[in-house]
Amino acid sequence: MPQVVAALGDLDPEVRLQAVETIRHWADSAKAVHSQVEPLLADPNPQVRARAAVALLQVGPHPQAMTLLRSMATLGDLDERVSALTALGDWGDSARAGPYWYRA
């Protein structure tokens, strides 16, 4: 797992995205996900920020992650909005996503 944790700081956003997904799937506790992924809520790439937020929300309530996704979905530029709405859809919790979630 040390190589995956190191990949969270890679210059390539695709590598960081894959590292978040790997940690989310293989971490042995919510605390492990939080400690490794939480710093990526400030990542410069909107896809990485959104994916980190979803990873945190999938292991339990995380107000900072939800606030970030809501802000990105309503106040962000086009890339941020698309990333946030895609992440909310991937999260799949329409009850907690509130008005930022639409299901036909």
Image: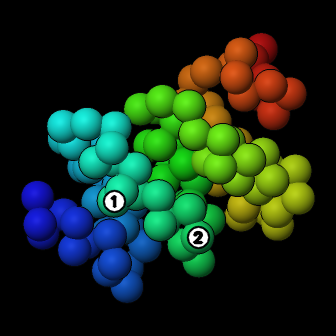
User: Which numbered disc flags the more N-terminal residue, 1 or 2?
Assistant: 1
What is the quadrant of residue 25 in the picture? top left
Question: 90 left or right of 78?
Answer: left
Task: Tell me the tag on residue 42.
Answer: 2
Across the whole image, how many numbered discs are drawn on residues? 2
Quadrant where the N terminus is found in the figure? bottom left
What's under tag 2, amino acid-wise?
Ala
Task: Please tell me which residue is depicted at 44% across the width and 43% down the height of the picture.
Answer: 55
Which x, y percent locates residue 50?
Answer: 58, 53
In the rendered image, residue 41, in percent from the top left (x then y), is placed at: 56, 62
User: Is the residue 14 above or below the residue 38 in the image?
Assistant: below
User: In this image, 4 relative to 87: left or right?
Assistant: left
Residue at the disc numbered 1: 36
The image quadrant of residue 26 is top left
Q: Residue at x 72, y 61 (%)?
A: 80
Residue at figure coordinates x 81%, y 33% from the top left: 100
Q: Tell me if I can see residue 90 in this picture.
A: no
Colour scheme shown? rainbow
**Mark 2, secondary structure of its residue:** helix
Q: Is residue 62 visible?
A: yes
* Mark 1 Cα-neighbour bin, 10 Å: few <14, some 14–19, many ≥20: many
Amino acid identity at mark 1: Gln
